[in-house]
Structures are given as structure tokens and as C-alpha cells.
Amino acid sequence: MKKSLLYGLLISVFISCTQTKTNDESKFSPLQKLQEGNKRFAAGKPVHPDETLERLRELKKGQHPFAIVVSCSDSRVPAELVFDQGLGDIFSIRTAGNVMGDYELGSIEYAVEHLDCKLVVVMGHKDCGAIKAFIKSEGHYEHFDHIKKIIEYIESEQEEKNLESHLELHLDKAIDANIEHGLTYLKGSEPILKAFYDSKKVKIIGALYDIETGKVTFDTNTKI
């Protein structure tokens, strides 16, 4: 009997903490929600919000994610966990090296235009395998698999070429250049994103995830 009461009390406390988190963050901006969620994750104190069947059934009526996160497919970089969010909170776009083409762009446009997302985050991460493969290839990737297409995409980024021309190419700078390319690509994408960005209807910012500490550093100096 005592064990049952204790168990019930613990469940009540957990639910209370989750509800408090939701209430406390109800007036936060999309960026603040991501920042606060990452603080909890990096501190080892996630609350795992919006993971219930009740939440799932609620979303059957429609989805209203508050942010779009473009990130790497790396299994160590799941946006919902990194930002301590749940079902329906993040519109997630994931590809190796967070590279983007027409399909990814169309998905982002859908979330901005039809789901009313106000924030797009292009998030690279430290020790990125796709960027490592690009650096190691040195323009001579000999295999003929589809990984080659990812490497060729990264090689074509002007931001990476700028690094090469100044002999500054190493992993961290190449990762930063890749994030910068994603930002430039989205901000100039017509006809949807450029118009929304120029009219300040959507923010597009960069971020870097440290897979060792769990912390995300946002480029809050990005002009919006």
C-alpha cells in the first residue's frame, strides 16, 4: 500500500513538473523554447514533454510546430531530444551533413507557409562525418555510391571554396562554413523563403551542437 502511494506521488510530481515547464514557457519565443530545452538536456534534467498518447491524439486535429530544425542525420543529433521537446513541437529536416536540395526546401517552405513556423534553425554539429568525408576526399572521392553526391554537394559550397583558397580548411571551420552555406541558401531561396525572411515573417539562424557536452550554441548575432 505504501509503495503504491509513493509511486502515485512520484507520478504526480513528474506531471506537475512537466505542466510547470509548459506553463513557464508559454510566453517564450521559439528560440527561447529551444534554448531552455537544450539547457535542460545538457544539464541531464530533461522533462520529456508532449510524449503522451493524449498529446498524440490532440495532434490528430492538426500540427503546429513552433520551429523548423535542419540538422544532420547522425544518430547522435536528434533535434527533439537535444532540445527536450516532444510530439508536434519541432518540424525536423535531417540529411547527412544537413545538406539541402529541392525536397528539403519544399518541406521547409510547407512548414513556413502552411504551418506558420516563425523560426528556422540550421544546426551543424561537431565531428560531423559528412564534413570529415569531404575533407578526406580532397576532391578525389573514388567510390561511385550515392555518398559521392553528398560530398560533391559540400565541395560545391562557395563557403567551403573560400576556405580552401585561403588554406584554412580544417574540420571545425569546414563545419561552420557548411552551416553558413545553409543559411545563405535558405535566405535567398525564392519564391517563398526569401520573401518571408526579407519581410521579417521568419527568422533563419545557425547553430552548432557539441556531441560531447550536449550544448547547442546559437548564432544569435544573425541579422533577422
Image (cartoon, grey):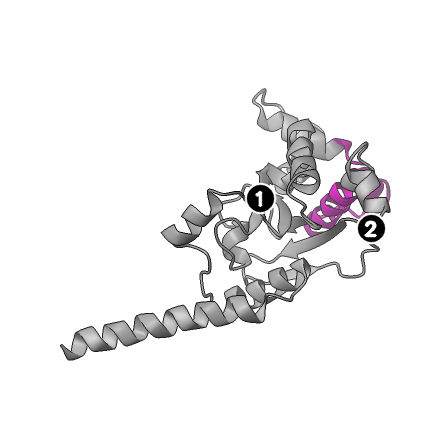
Q: What is the magenta range?
A: 156-185
- Within the magenta stretch, is there residue 162? yes
Quadrant of image for the N terminus? bottom left
- Residue type indicated by callout 2: Lys
| Residue 200: mark in rendering | 2
Query: Overall secondary structure of the magenta stretch?
Result: helix
Expressed as whole percent of the image width and height from the top left, the position of residue 22 reads 52, 66
Can residue 141 be seen here?
Answer: no
- Quarter of the rendering containing residue 12: bottom left
Q: Nearer the viewer, residue 75 or 17?
A: 17
Quote the CA–CA distance across marks 1 and 2.
22 Å
- Within the magenta stretch, is there residue 218? no
Q: Nearer the viewer, residue 40 or 211?
A: 40
Residue placed farthest to the front in the image?
Answer: 61
Label 2: how many residues lie within 10 Å, few (<14), some (14-19) or many (20+)?
few
Determine whether, in the image, residue 54 is placed left or right of residue 132: left
Q: Earlier in the sequence, mark 1 or mark 2?
A: 1
- Quarter of the rendering containing residue 163: top right
Can residue 10 be seen here?
Answer: yes
Expressed as whole percent of the image width and height from the top left, the position of residue 220 reads 76, 61
Q: Secondary structure at mark 2?
A: loop
Q: Is residue 220 above or below residue 54?
A: below
Residue placed farthest to the top in the image?
Answer: 144
Q: Is residue 140 above or below residue 195?
A: above
Q: Are dots 1 and 2 in contact, CB under 8 Å?
A: no
According to the image, label 1 marks what residue? Answer: 92
